[in-house]
Amino acid sequence: MDCLFCKIAAGEIPAQKLYEDDEIMAFLDIFPATAGHTLVMPKAHYADLPETPDGLLEKMIRAVRKLSPAILEGLGSQAFNLVVNNGKLAGQVVPHVHFHIMPRYPDDTIKVNIPQQPYPEGEIELVKQKILQALEK
């Protein structure tokens, strides 16, 4: 087993666990963006979000909903970002699906302002059609 997160789930690598049940585990990221940066993942290996069964995704988001208020209260934060990096190009470092809960603080250095721009004339309809055609497959 070469997957770092599978090794954590198997207990082969120690982790600062915050939550664990039969299928889901949450632990503190050892390279946090902010204090309390938590990773929530299934114990079973799924490389990315589309590969992960719906039931596991539901359990992951329930764990996020349970943990996030405790993280905020415990650390005195009032907000958090929930992030999924899906695929290497999107910044996914470990190819095992996981959510990041990142508490936010007034002086943190996380940048969340993603540059946005309108579609060129007529392009939005083309993009919509391509996506709808893919959904029909």
Image (cartoon, helix red, strand yellow):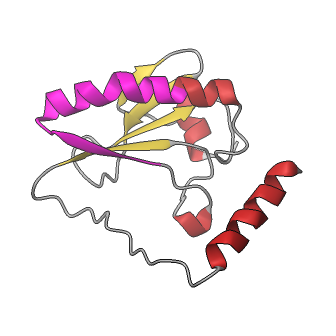
Rendered image quadrant of residue 46: top right
Residue depicted at 64% across the width and 45% down the height = 49
Place of residue 111 in the rendered image (x, y in percent of width and height, measured from the top left): 28, 66
Residue depicted at 15% across the width and 39% down the height = 77
Q: Residue furthest top?
A: 22
* Apparent side of residue 107 relative to residue 18 in the rendered image (left or right): left
Majority secondary structure of magenta residues: helix
Looking at the image, is 62 positioned above or below residue 109? above
Q: Which residues are magenta?
A: 60-83
Given residues 78 and 63, the one toward you in this image is 78
Q: Residue furthest bottom?
A: 120
Q: Is residue 12 visible?
A: no
Q: Count the marks: how many?
A: 0
Looking at the image, is 111 positioned above or below residue 33? below
Looking at the image, is 18 positioned above or below residue 121? above
Place of residue 107 in the rendered image (x, y in percent of width and height, measured from the top left): 10, 59
* Apparent side of residue 25 relative to residue 72 in the rendered image (left or right): right
Place of residue 80 in the rendered image (x, y in percent of width and height, measured from the top left): 27, 43
* Apparent side of residue 18 relative to residue 104 in the rendered image (left or right): right
Q: Is residue 132 visible?
A: yes
Rendered image quadrant of residue 68: top left
Given residues 23 and 57, the one toward you in this image is 57
